């Protein structure tokens, strides 16, 4: 099973390299291509043995720093979510060099290994917290028990993120897959509206942004989207690969997943869109 999984990743990477070459050629021929911006999504910034992280939720501290330095040295403008939304809403022209950095779940390592690193470089990012797990004194239930994962961050850590001028958003109350919840149940309300209210009460701020747990095309729908809108959120973020362009749906914004096996070369071609085909193929396989 593990051999099959590794082979699958190798094949996917090989196809993506070919796709990257195609993208470079196409952009060289047609400079008029509409520009889009990317939003990156990380989870935990910690050195965890790869064998203990089959979901690829971690990125080592060293690799994270290299990736951030690459963005800076390559001329990317690392922006807040407020600025990103302004670009997508049409308030500013997108050049293709705008980017945002986000983190899902709310691991305690996000403070020292991510937020403090970014702050020292004058950068910002957004952290989507799972409301009911704040202050939980054990690892998230979806992490491998023997994987040396970080625990959820504490309320004190979340407040510290705000003091560093980072953005905090909601990642539901319990990290539930919204697409699997009965749309008429109170649970859906608790996960979306309830998490917003809990975070606002704990942190004393307005929560404007929401990130779908799992973030694939089956984890949200028009019903969940309408509840998110009616709850007072300004935008919602998926984990679907792709660029975001002017006029796109603010409640289905795409994000580029970054994992422990993203070398600098692979990171670079992800930024170029070489992996965007992956989720398009997955979506095409869904039953109509």
Image (spheres, grey):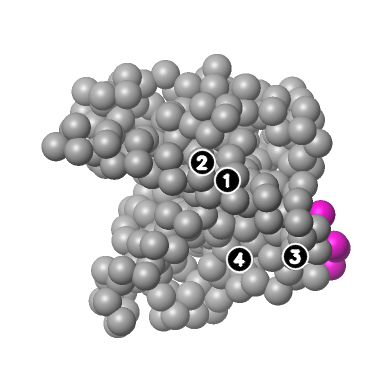
Task: Look at mark 1 in the image and give the residue it sits on.
Answer: 20
Is 181 positioned to the left or the right of 232 in the image? left
Q: Quadrant of the C terminus?
A: bottom left
- Identify the residue position indicated by label 2 in the image: 17
Of mark 3 and mark 4, the one earlier in the sequence is: 3
Marks 3 and 4, how far apart at CA: 22 Å
Query: Circle 4 — which element?
Result: strand
Residue at (61% x, 73% y) in the render: 249
Marks 2 and 1 close (CB-CB < 8 Å): yes
Q: Is residue 109 visible?
A: no
Compute the Cα span from label 4 to label 2. Answer: 32 Å
Closer to the chain start, of discs 4 and 2, is: 2
Please tell me which residue is depicted at 30% across the width and 30% down the height of the picture: 53
Q: Nearer the viewer, residue 233 or 285?
A: 285
Residues drawn in magenta: 91-95
> Which residue matches tag 3?
34
Q: Magenta includes 12? A: no
Q: Main secondary structure of the magenta part?
A: loop
On screen, residue 95 versus residue 165, left or right, reads: right
Label 3 vs label 4, nearer the camera: 3
* Corner quadrant of residue 73: top right
CB contact under 8 Å: marks 1 and 3: no
Residue to which mark 4 is pinned: 235
Give the mark, 3 or 2, whose residue is nearer the N terminus.
2
Front residue of 276 and 171: 276
Q: Position of residue 264 (x, y in %)?
A: 58, 27
CB atoms at circles 3 and 4 under 8 Å apart? no
């Amino acid at each position: 099973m593990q051999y099959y999984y590794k082979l699958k990743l190798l094949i996917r990477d090989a196809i993506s390299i070919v796709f990257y070459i195609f993208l470079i050629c196409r952009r060289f021929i047609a400079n008029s291509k509409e520009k889009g911006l990317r939003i990156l999504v990380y989870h935990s910034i910690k050195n965890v043995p790869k064998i203990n992280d089959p979901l690829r939720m971690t990125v080592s501290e060293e690799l994270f720093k290299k990736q951030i330095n690459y963005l800076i040295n390559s001329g990317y403008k690392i922006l807040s979510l407020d600025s990103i939304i302004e670009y997508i809403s049409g308030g500013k022209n997108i050049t293709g060099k705008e980017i945002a950095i986000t983190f899902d779940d709310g691991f305690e390592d996000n403070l020292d290994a991510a937020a403090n690193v970014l702050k020292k470089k004058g950068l910002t990012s957004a952290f989507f917290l799972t409301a009911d797990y704040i202050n939980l004194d054990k690892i998230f239930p979806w992490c491998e028990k023997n994987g040396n994962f970080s625990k959820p961050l504490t309320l004190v850590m979340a407040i510290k993120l705000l003091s560093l001028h980072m953005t905090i958003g909601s990642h539901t109350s319990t990290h539930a897959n919204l697409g699997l919840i009965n749309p008429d149940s109170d649970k859906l309300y608790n996960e979306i509206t309830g998490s917003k209210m809990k975070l606002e009460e704990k942190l004393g701020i307005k929560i404007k942004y929401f990130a779908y747990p799992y973030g694939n095309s089956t984890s949200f729908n028009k019903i969940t989207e309408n509840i998110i809108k009616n709850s007072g959120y300004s935008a919602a973020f998926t984990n679907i690969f792709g660029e975001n362009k002017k006029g796109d749906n603010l409640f289905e914004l795409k994000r580029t997943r970054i994992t422990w096996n993203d070398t600098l070369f692979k990171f670079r071609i992800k930024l170029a869109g070489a992996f965007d085909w992956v989720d398009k193929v997955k979506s095409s396989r869904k039953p109509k």
